[in-house]
Image (cartoon, rainbow, N blue to C red):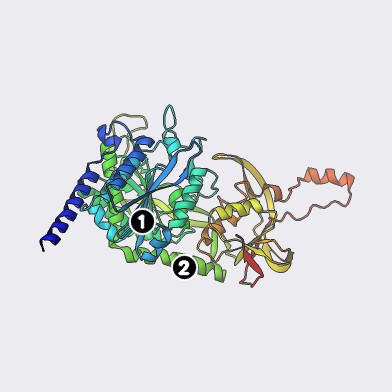
Amino acid sequence: MKKYSTIILSIVLILIITSANAQDILTASEKSGFQRYTSHVELIDFLKKIQAASTEMKLGFYGKTIEGRKIPYAVFSRPSITQPWEAMVSGKTIAMLVANVHGGERTLRESNLMLIRELATPGTEANRLLDDLVIIMVPTINPDGFENKPRPTRGNSQGVDMNRDYMKLEQPALVQYVQNIMLKWHPHIFVDGHNGGSYPYNVSYQAPSHAAPDQRLTELSDRELFPFIDKKMEESGYRSFYYSGGNERAWRVGGSDPRIGRNYGGFLNTFGILFESPGGQDPEIGAKSGMVAYLAVLQWTAQNADKVMMYVNRARRETIEMGDAAEGEVPVAMTYEAEAFKVNYEYNAAPRGERERDMKKVTGGDILKKPVITKARPRPYAYILEAKAHKAVKLLRKHGITVEVLLKDTEIPVSVYVMESVSRREEYDHPAAVTVKLEDTVVDTVLTFPGGTYVIPTGQMMGRVAAHLLEPETNDNVIRWNTMDAILPRMYTEEQIQRMRRYRSNFKPGLPIIPIYKLMRPTPLSTIILN
């Protein structure tokens, strides 16, 4: 009996020592009294020390930046989870908290690091959540932007805004994050940490706001998650509200583009949550309030684990079912209108540039974030691309979209779009992003497609992403981002037609068909998955 008592005492002492060690490890920012931010080298050192003091933290690196910096991630769970498939079969809800996709937005990066310590410390409120959740922590997505000299930059080392790269997936650090973290771990909920928003709120939030994802994910966030965050923040002496600001008439929110992280999360059939820490607040308050908000998401998720998984799994299942049945429509254009519910908020009415604030309260105001579809196209059973569209297919496969290949020449009934005009203009880092204008009516025809033609079924979990990329009128499609420049039909002006007819009197330009073909009905085809 004495022997067992000694063993138990030893175990308790080890746990106490481990807890003390983890709890005593501070970030460089904390050591400085929050007078500076933790550098990337210090961040890696901090993570290694926390991992060495914990049996419940798995530390890894999922990629490298253009400038060669390793990008870390940490996995927490009890019992231990080391790989995505283990998380999926565990039956637990998978939550992911990330930050610093904009290099100069650093406050919630510090919050993420501080919460990592809490997760690794036995006995803390955060650590107790490991019984119910698998938690993925990514404190920095853009270390090159963070370490840019003489000052951090919003973009990466190439000056590219990686929070506008989620659909075109061109920047190595973001490609690695999407492929090695998002598309492998498939979190049920994730929070993307930024700096922005409006005083007097310490943290601002927003859910996906595009019309294509399952709207019930956003509705549950509005109805339950965000009020829970507000409650937890208030208990800690902080305030939170929607991103990003308002006036006496209404509150405005962030953009609806799928190329933005939280909206891309909606297209992946997950709760994609934006956090913004407003600038101008004390750095210590910003970091600590951010940690409270991050923790609140984990607490709400643990308390509502079955509901969260039900909502996400339903969205994933219905995405596949819609595609298999070729049902519903694909939104290609949308706008914001006021939500049915009203909000109470404060805003600064002082003229821009004024140092003194003039705070006003609004009761029962509008919030302009309801996505309303202004144009949609029928969802096909599959999209078909010529073998020459290999650049577009490469982009699809970066997203984990399943692409099949015809094994033999096949006659297929398809619907095609006729191009009315094409234009190019600078958009983000693209000097000549392509916009096509289509005729409203489609042409139904039967074409023979040779073996080697690509077939992209919409009946897959990535079906919402596939449809958005392959509908030519969306704001993030394979044509827009220049992957089909070489095979777009030529558009002739009337002057060019007349000039051609001087040499060939019978010259008649062909119908400018967009080379993205739509198979509208479920149809068996002789195909094989492209590996």
Residue placed furthest toward the top: 150
Q: Residues within 10 Å of mark 1 (few under 14, many from 20)?
A: many
- Is residue 237 in view from this perspective? no
Q: Residue at x 48, y 40 (%)?
A: 65
In the image, taking residue 423 as reference, residue 60 lies left or right, namely: left
**Pointers 2 and 1 in contact (C-beta within 8 Å):** no
Name the spot of residue 271 as percent of width and height, x first. Answer: 39, 57
User: How far is the residue under mark 2 from the one under mark 1?
Assistant: 19 Å
- Residue 384 vs 67, above or below: the answer is below
Task: Identify the image quadrant of residue 288.
Answer: top left
* Label 1 SS: strand
Question: Front-most of 205 and 155?
Answer: 155
Question: Front-most of 39 and 358?
Answer: 39
Q: Which residue is mark 1?
A: 95
Question: Front-most of 65 and 305?
Answer: 65
- Residue 134 vs 110, above or below: the answer is below
* Label 2 vs label 1, nearer the camera: 1
At label 1, the amino acid type is Ala
> Going from the N terminus, do you reach mark 2 or mark 1 first?
1
* Label 2 SS: helix
Q: Which residue is mark 2?
A: 317
Q: Residues within 10 Å of mark 2 (few under 14, many from 20)?
A: some
Name the spot of residue 136 as percent of width and height, x first. Answer: 37, 52
Name the spot of residue 119 as percent of width and height, x first. Answer: 28, 51
Q: Quadrant of the C terminus?
A: bottom right
Q: Residue at x 43, y 51 (%)?
A: 262
Residue placed furthest toward the front: 3
At label 2, the amino acid type is Arg
Q: Residue at x 51, y 70 (%)?
A: 321
Name the spot of residue 195 as percent of width and height, x first. Answer: 37, 40
In the image, taking residue 78 as reference, residue 151 lies left or right, namely: right
